[in-house]
Amino acid sequence: MLARRIIPCLDCDLGVPQGRVVKGIEFKQIRYAGIPWELAYRYYKEGADEIIFLDITASHERRETMVNVIRETAEKVFVPLAVGGGIKTVEDARKIFNAGADKITMNTTALRQPEIITEIADEYGSQACVVAIDAKRRPGREEGRIMVDTPEGECWFECSFYGGREFAGIDAIAWAQKVEELGAGEIMLTSMDRDGTYDGFDIPLTDAVSRKIRIPVIASGGCGNVDHMLEVFQKTRASAALAASIFHYDEQNIGSVKRRLADEGIEMRL
């Protein structure tokens, strides 16, 4: 396996001219964290392998704000930048790529228009097309679902969209397999149950998805400390660990995290 990656995620509220980074708990309870390109530059200097920007207030009127954020960031930050939120067409993606992004991430649009995954992968390469899956636990056995054993019992995982406000009725693991077939180059897998809780990644979910597909999986949701990252790398095939709160609020330094993981035998880019 290639070196594992540490990826800070910046949830961007673009309701103000320069944008602002915020963080919630289980997709709610939002609090302020900083200015997007300032945080991105800090994480780049600390050794982040990539940086993900998510426009959590995506709308047509605010699309230009995100373009400006990426353009400003790309002038000083020289690691891959991924951008998601409100990308509905190939033209939307093109504007983001032209601003300096290396990858785009899609959730709602991919669920509603799966063919766009293939269109973007064909035009920009699979490595530039990341599908975000926000997955919610559904306890109990259900016909036609891929069941996962957890310490709390059997469950399946349902895809959500519109920032976790609606559910698609689609099995998250089956969907991950489908988007791989359509040409996606990576999955950003977020546990809605763990998001912002500091309780650690959802290991059964991450393990189940990463074993079913060949493309890289970014584990997201619940990271509270470096031990959670160590656990997800030791117990699953996830290629990257994503975190937000622990970096935004100075609880952990990316460089220190990577050195600790390397000391524990996890291959890292130092």
Image: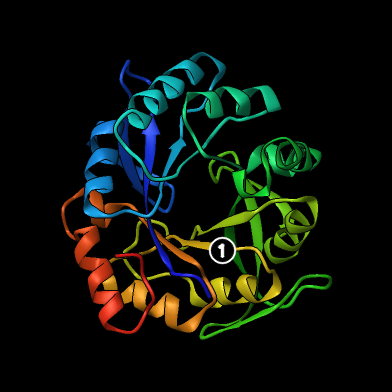
Instruction: Give coordinates of residue 78: x percent, y percent.
Output: 35, 41
State the residue at coordinates (81%, 40%). 115
Question: Is residue 185 left or right of 243 when viewed as pictured?
Answer: right
Which residue is depicted at the point 47% across and 18% down?
62
The quarter holding residue 170 reads bottom right
Residue lying at 30% horizontally and 75% vertically, measured from the top left: 261
Badge 1 element: strand
| Image quarter in which the C terminus is found | bottom left
Position of residue 155 relative to residue 20, above or below, is: below
Front residue of 270 and 130: 270
Does residue 254 appear left or right of residue 210 in this picture?
A: left
Q: How is the image coloured?
A: rainbow
Residue 86, horizontal then vertical, whole percent = 58, 30
Residue 7 seen in render: yes
Which residue is tagged 1?
Answer: 217
Q: Which amino acid, by three-letter code, is at mark 1?
A: Val
Compared with 115, 178 (above or below) is: below
The quadrant where residue 19 appears: top left
Tell me which residue sits at (46%, 34%) in the image: 56
Q: Residues within 10 Å of mark 1 (few under 14, many from 20)?
A: many
Tell me if residue 32 can be seen.
no
The answer to whether residue 197 is left or right of residue 3 is left
Farthest left residue in view: 250
Q: Which of 141/94 is in front?
A: 94
